[in-house]
Amino acid sequence: MVGRLIVAAILDTLLSSVLPVALIFFIGYLAGQRDGFNQPDAASIFKFIAQISAPAIIVNIVITTDVASLDPALTGLYLISELMVYAIGFFITWFWFQLGFKDALLCGLAASFANHVLFVYPITQFAFDPVMSIPVRSIITIDIIIFTLTIIVLDIHQAPSAGPLRAMAGQLRNPLLLALLLGVLIVLNPFGTPLTLIRCASFIADAAAPCGLFASGILLARPISKNNLKLAMVITGLKMLLHPILGVLIIIFAGGYAIEAARTTLMVTVAPVGVMALTFASRYGGKTDAIAQSILWSFCLSVILIPIFAVI
């Protein structure tokens, strides 16, 4: 009887919270396969997301989150699991696959960084009370720092003669980092946050998930080289198997958190590989085929795993 109730709850979460978000990805995939939309179309959509809609999400998260409701310890434990997967992915691909530093770093990023902004965050808004989305908000915020540091390291590696100061100065044009700083400044504003700004940021932010998932489907509909299948399998395995195992061990067993309190945080560990990893790989000339393949595989797996983690 208990088993049937659990299965019913998993199916209900799948149908009511996960598939409404996931279907737009598969619609984009079909549209890309039928040439209704092409790669330049996807690139234009991603440009809007990267420069406008995703920064709006960050501003919206910062200005609408009650600081008193944050749990830094839970976010810190997740960060430990994420950085461990990042490091393991880097060293495996560096030593075992004998990739260069740049490619190994990008593979480590892909293995550890989840698609929480476009996938897990909207699912939590469907499936749980608003308070349960706060841990996901915290993870999104802290991952901006990891992204920024990764870009700095890649820029230094790509142009070592320019020096680290120039690489760090380049982040003054990073829309996500600027959005985070803007959100903090708005919160610290002694006159309060204007309702117009709150609603505008929320309105723009709502466009990110459907547009991003649709564009991701278009992007992954293109023919992908099968030359790096083993590497794609390793990235997928690290993200969808190792990360949730480490998450449970570190957050539940070592951290002492109850599963219910850490549920949405653990859902992030089984989220698919983030699309930004593919964007970075394309920008820096990395293993785009392997990362694209891992995004597609991990997305399909996450559709199954997220409802399970949301219930059990």
Image (tube, helix red, strand yellow):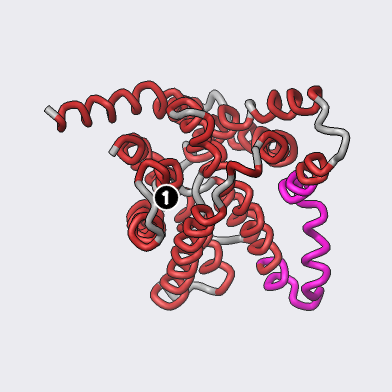
Q: Picture coordinates of residue 258 (x, y %)? A: 36, 48
Q: Residue at x 33, y 41 (%)?
A: 309
Q: Picture coordinates of residue 32 (x, y %)? A: 51, 30
Q: Nearer the viewer, residue 133 or 88?
A: 133
Q: Picture coordinates of residue 294 (x, y %)? A: 42, 50
In-image side of 229 versus 312 (left or right): right
Q: Quadrant of residue 45?
A: top right
Q: Picture coordinates of residue 76 (x, y %)? A: 53, 58
Q: Residue at x 47, y 36 (%)?
A: 221
Span shown in magenta: 154-181
From the image, which quarter does the C terminus lie in?
top left
Q: How many marks?
A: 1
Which residue has dot 1 on it? 269
Visible in this render: residue 287? Answer: no
Q: Amino acid at mark 1?
A: Thr
In-image side of 93 versus 39 (left or right): left
State the SS at label 1: helix
Q: Residue at x 65, y 52 (%)?
A: 144
Against 89, residue 128 (above or below) is above
Direction right: furthest residue: 191
Q: Does the magenta segment cover residue 171?
A: yes
